[in-house]
């Protein structure tokens, strides 16, 4: 028998929790929705294909029926169940807020304790029947290793949107969450897994079973937009968790053991509860529904369907019956399935759900961590699990201190600033300091703007470029061995990374307010990229903002073969300028001509090859393949200008062609615009070559400004 049980544990996790690739079943959905509401009995039928599971289920059912007949459920005892919400996200909307989770837990407790006001408005035939289940669900505050937390774990993984295997999603959480990486046993916690996709359902769970008693998969899967009534969810989808907890406590749908309401054969089946009238189920709030007469003998009259029951699919669910209460509370008496251990005093203490809360850790967050000068940040105290007092310290902010739970702070001077929060529960005090937490961007630079990354030794923690790396893996870094112009560029080491990565490089503000409404602004940049395989499909997206990054507008998208049709299986780097592509973004419209204009480059990787970015150039006027660093460019009288070698460690050669003889100035400028060398050259008609001695200058980045009597051109160069 033990051998069969161990075999079943493997089969159950790999088979019983694996979604089948099947088309959307409209008969398993509520009216107007494109999500199948519940997969409870679908999962059960899949597991019933395994003989080991059938044997164990028979024993589980026998034990349950014996407990039910014994009628040994204590009266007037409120059972408390420790709950952990595991948010599996990929940095999208599915990463719901703590407030939405607390709201969903409130609704679950409200429904189970008959505190929902709408229970008083059930149909007249069911008045007086809604029951207080006397079960409460409490956020656990201790992880399996005893570490204190706030009842929620968060795991970033692309599996959030791959619900083909519930077991795989649980494994990702077990191995990658931010609290405790290991198993959260199902006989100690009610684990609720919040995901972006769970195999086409809004929710599903497992019935109480000896086989899964201690497994972490003994929990509930829920779509993020069916959790609570706020945030990504709504009132209409807010009771899905109530429905699934009913299944978790051994309730079936009111029409019996399948997932398809409206099936006429349901009148011959039953949900195992005597005071829920037989029915075929509904997909909407059809108050007149009266689909079966097989229950008339029990009731003594022809009674309508109890469509207001939480175990139906209607949009007007508002009650459990006394019979359902008995069945659920009986399920909590089973030691074999692990349900009885959940509410034991020792387990409530071990999981931190006994009711005595203390301060575990000070923590906080902010609505924004990168702002322009003069803007404000809203801070929120996220300390857990109880706080009676707090003291904030805001370096560089106004106010510089606060005792509020959610202070608003204004920053006026550019820089990187630390924030400290000291929180107390009256006995215990904890301090959290986040260094370089608030980035206040420097004053906006003027046009023309050019970024060749030549003046940096690192991109990290620079005030003029923000690096966004939500996957906490390879981010944009400074590359010093290759570039289109000079010797440096920005590089994303995309080769060898896992799929579904997002990386961003965001500029400091640039002042476009001086551009007239009828003016033309062009954003140009160069990139180099190869795929790893021919089938790779990765994206480069360019965004612009007029309000310092509060809102963004997408202006350019390059993906798949449009980004590059070439591929190489090795980690790739550009070998020459021919490997680079110049892109011109011409749809920077007058709506964005503000002093807080910003640019954002986003690379969305799927495990392809490396990406390089150079010569980010923003200027007034039409597109130019040359870097624009002045508003008055040479006309056709001077052309074919080139600098070489670049970088140089000795002489810099300047070649150009002149249409006539003319006097010209060659000025060398440092990065601040200071003239450090000036030469006068009498150019002749035709080809010209000017040799400039750069050995007297220190290594670094410079500009060469070439001027005639009426025009000029500025070109960057680097001295090694």
Image (cartoon, rainbow, N blue to C red):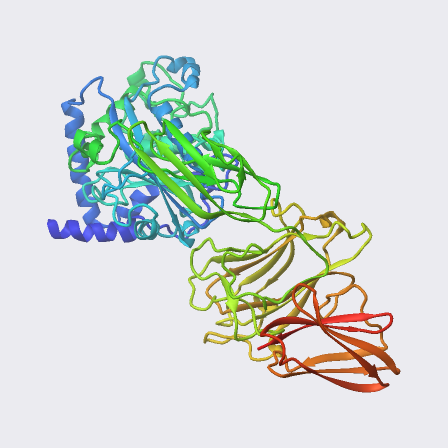
Furthest residue in direction left, as rendered: 1
- Label tally: 0
Give the x, y percent position of residue 304: 40, 20
Give the x, y percent position of residue 503: 51, 58
Furthest residue in direction right, as rendered: 660
Residue 175 to residue 223: above or below: below
Residue 557 to residue 131: above or below: below
User: Which image quadrant is residue 483 in?
Assistant: bottom right
User: Observer-nearest residue: 30 or 89?
Assistant: 89
Residue shown at 48% from the left, 30% from the top: 236
User: Which image quadrant is residue 643 in?
Assistant: bottom right
Q: Is residue 442 left or right of residue 427?
A: right
Give the x, y percent position of residue 42: 34, 43
Residue shown at 22% from the left, 17% from the top: 76
Residue 548 to residue 574: above or below: above
Q: Is residue 29 left or right of residue 540?
A: left
> Looking at the image, can residue 318 be seen?
yes
Q: Is residue 570 left or right of residue 667?
A: left
Q: Quadrant of the C terminus?
A: bottom right
Give the x, y percent position of residue 127: 38, 13
Residue shown at 47% from the left, 66% from the top: 494
> Looking at the image, can residue 280 be seen?
no
User: Which image quadrant is residue 637 in?
Assistant: bottom right
């Amino acid at each position: 028998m033990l051998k069969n049980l161990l075999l079943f544990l493997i089969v159950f996790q790999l088979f019983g929790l694996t979604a089948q690739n099947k088309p959307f079943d409209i008969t398993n959905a509520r009216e107007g929705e494109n999500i199948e509401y519940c997969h409870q009995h679908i999962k059960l039928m899949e597991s019933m294909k395994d003989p080991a599971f059938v044997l164990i289920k028979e024993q589980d059912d026998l034990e349950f029926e014996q407990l039910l007949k014994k009628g040994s459920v204590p009266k007037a005892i409120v059972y408390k169940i420790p709950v952990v919400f595991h948010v599996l996200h990929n940095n999208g909307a599915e990463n719901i807020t703590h407030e939405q989770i607390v709201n969903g837990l409130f609704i679950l407790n409200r429904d189970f304790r008959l505190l929902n006001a709408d229970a008083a408005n059930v149909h007249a035939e069911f008045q007086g029947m809604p029951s207080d289940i006397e079960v409460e669900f409490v956020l656990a505050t201790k992880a399996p290793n005893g570490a204190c937390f706030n009842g929620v774990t968060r795991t970033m993984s692309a599996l959030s949107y791959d619900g083909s295997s519930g077991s795989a999603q649980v494994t990702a959480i077990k191995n990658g969450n931010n609290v405790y990486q290991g198993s959260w046993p199902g006989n100690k916690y009610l684990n609720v897994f919040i995901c972006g996709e769970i195999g086409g359902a809004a929710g599903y769970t497992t019935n109480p079973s000896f086989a899964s008693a201690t497994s972490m998969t003994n929990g509930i899967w829920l779509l993020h937009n069916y959790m609570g009534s706020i945030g990504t969810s709504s009132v209409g989808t807010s009771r899905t968790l109530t429905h699934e907890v009913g299944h978790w406590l051994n309730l079936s749908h009111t029409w019996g053991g399948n997932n398809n309401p409206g099936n006429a054969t349901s009148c011959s089946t039953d949900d195992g509860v005597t005071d829920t009238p037989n029915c075929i189920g509904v997909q909407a709030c059809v108050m007149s529904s009266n689909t079966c007469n097989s229950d008339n003998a029990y009731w003594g009259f022809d009674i309508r369907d109890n469509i207001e029951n939480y175990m139906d699919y209607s949009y007007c669910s508002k009650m459990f019956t006394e019979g359902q209460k008995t069945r659920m509370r009986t399920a909590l008496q089973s030691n074999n399935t692990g349900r009885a251990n959940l509410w034991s005093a020792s387990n409530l203490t071990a999981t931190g759900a006994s009711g005595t809360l203390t301060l575990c850790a000070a923590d906080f967050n902010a609505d924004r961590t990168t702002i322009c000068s003069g803007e404000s940040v809203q801070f929120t105290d996220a300390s857990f699990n109880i706080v009676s007092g707090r003291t904030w310290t805001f370096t560089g902010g106004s106010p510089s201190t606060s005792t509020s739970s959610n202070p608003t702070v204004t920053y006026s001077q550019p820089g990187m600033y630390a924030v400290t929060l000291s929180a107390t529960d009256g006995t215990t005090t904890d301090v959290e300091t986040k260094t370089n937490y608030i980035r206040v961007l420097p004053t906006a630079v003027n046009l023309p703007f050019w970024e060749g990354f030549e003046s940096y030794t690192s991109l990290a923690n620079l005030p003029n470029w923000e690096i966004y790396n939500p996957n906490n893996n390879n981010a944009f870094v400074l590359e010093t061995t290759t570039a289109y112009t000079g010797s440096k560029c920005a590089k994303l080491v995309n080769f060898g990374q896992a799929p579904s990565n997002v990386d961003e490089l965001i500029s400091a503000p640039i002042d476009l307010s001086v551009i007239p409404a009828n003016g033309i602004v062009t954003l140009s940049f160069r990139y180099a990229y190869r795929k790893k395989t021919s089938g790779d499909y990765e994206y480069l997206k360019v965004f612009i903002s007029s309000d310092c990054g509060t809102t963004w507008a997408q202006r350019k998208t390059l993906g798949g073969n449009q980004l590059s049709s070439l591929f190489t299986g090795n980690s790739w780097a550009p070998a020459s300028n021919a490997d680079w592509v110049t892109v011109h973004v011409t749809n920077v419209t007058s709506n964005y001509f503000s002093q807080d204009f910003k640019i954002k480059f986003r690379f969305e990787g799927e495990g392809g090859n490396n990406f390089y970015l150079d010569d980010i150039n923003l200027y007034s006027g039409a597109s130019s393949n040359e870097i624009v660093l002045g508003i008055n460019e040479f006309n056709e009288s001077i052309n074919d200008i080139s600098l070489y070698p670049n970088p140089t460690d000795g002489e810099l050669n300047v070649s150009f062609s002149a249409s006539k003889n003319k006097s010209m100035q060659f000025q060398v400028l440092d990065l601040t615009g200071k003239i450090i060398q000036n030469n006068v050259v009498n150019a002749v008609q035709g080809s010209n070559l000017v040799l400039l001695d750069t050995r007297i200058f220190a290594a670094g980045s410079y500009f060469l400004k070439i001027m005639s009597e009426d025009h000029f051109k500025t070109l960057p160069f680097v001295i090694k």
